Image (spheres, rainbow, N blue to C red):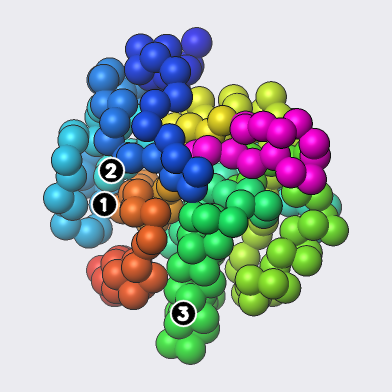
Amino acid sequence: MNRRQYLGAIGGGIAALSAGCSTAESDTTVTSERSIDASNTYLDTPDLRAEPSILPYPAYGQSLPDVTLSDPLAGDSVSIDSDGRDTLITFFYSHCQTVCPRLISALRNVQAKAIEDNRIDTTAFQAVTFDPERDDADRLGGYADRMNVALDENWRFLAPDSPEDAKDIVMDEFGVRFERTHPEEMDKYMFTHRSLILLVNADGYVERSYTDSTPSWQSIYDDLRTLRDREA
């Protein structure tokens, strides 16, 4: 049983979920096995309601889980890491009608601003779906168009290979809890899930974990700009 599974077992099920997101610090129960070292970060210590070591998701000073995901649009697989660039990561599914469009919009607006400010070459975006059964290449391509995402500007839509892998990776490794709802029809079911955006520095360590269901893209961009300036 890995760290995220252990947290879920101790926490006892999926708690405090809503149609779009869940509260962020509702299951802070166990000391993390993931190391924390502020010397790996560039931004100041954030004002957290809990120590990073007991949060279920990667937080300030922690490295990302070592996982590989498919890119349905590119037809290849990539490792979740910073790839030498500052990276923004979020978790979503394209049929979501509540929080997911806000998460994707926040990253899209940061992307647009980074392009405008000539910072896009040092910035990457990864949006990970936990609904691989429906979020195939055709679906994600149409979703990118609807959300006005620039796929050719360091943006990737990533997907686990199966629903089981989605649980193992998104829920157990990244601490993004989700639960499929009824009805069972493929075109109608939804998920309750946690809201999370991660800002990861070029060395692969988390600088910020944004858990607001209505994230401020301006605040995220300000953090990104400060991070890049301090890394330079």
> Is 132 one of the magenta-colored residues?
no
Q: Which residue is mark 3?
A: 114
Q: Sequence order check: which comes first, mark 3 or mark 1?
A: 1
Label 2's element? loop
Q: What whole-number distance in Å separates the C-alpha atoms at marks 3 and 2?
A: 24 Å
Q: Residue furthest bottom?
A: 116
* Magenta stretch: dominant secondary structure: loop
Q: Position of residue 108 (x, y in %)?
A: 53, 72
Which residue shows up at 53% across the image and 33% down it?
178
- Whether residue 111 is visible to the viewer of this picture, yes or no, is yes
Of badges 3 and 1, nearer the viewer stands 3
Q: Which residue is mark 2?
A: 61
User: Where are the magenta residues, as a range?
Assistant: 180-194
Label 3's element? helix
Which residue shows up at 67% across the image and 54% down it?
94
Verify CB contact (< 8 Å) between mark 1 and mark 2: yes
Which residue shows up at 38% across the image and 70% down it?
217
Q: Sequence order check: which comes first, mark 1 or mark 2?
A: 1
Q: Amino acid at mark 3?
A: Ala
Q: Which one is in front, 45 or 103?
A: 103
Which residue shows up at 50% across the image and 39% down it?
193
Q: Which one is in front, 33 or 127?
A: 127
Q: Which one is in front, 97 or 159?
A: 97
Of badges 3 and 2, nearer the viewer stands 3
Label 1's element? loop
> Is 181 one of the magenta-colored residues?
yes
Work out whether 42 lies above or below 55: below
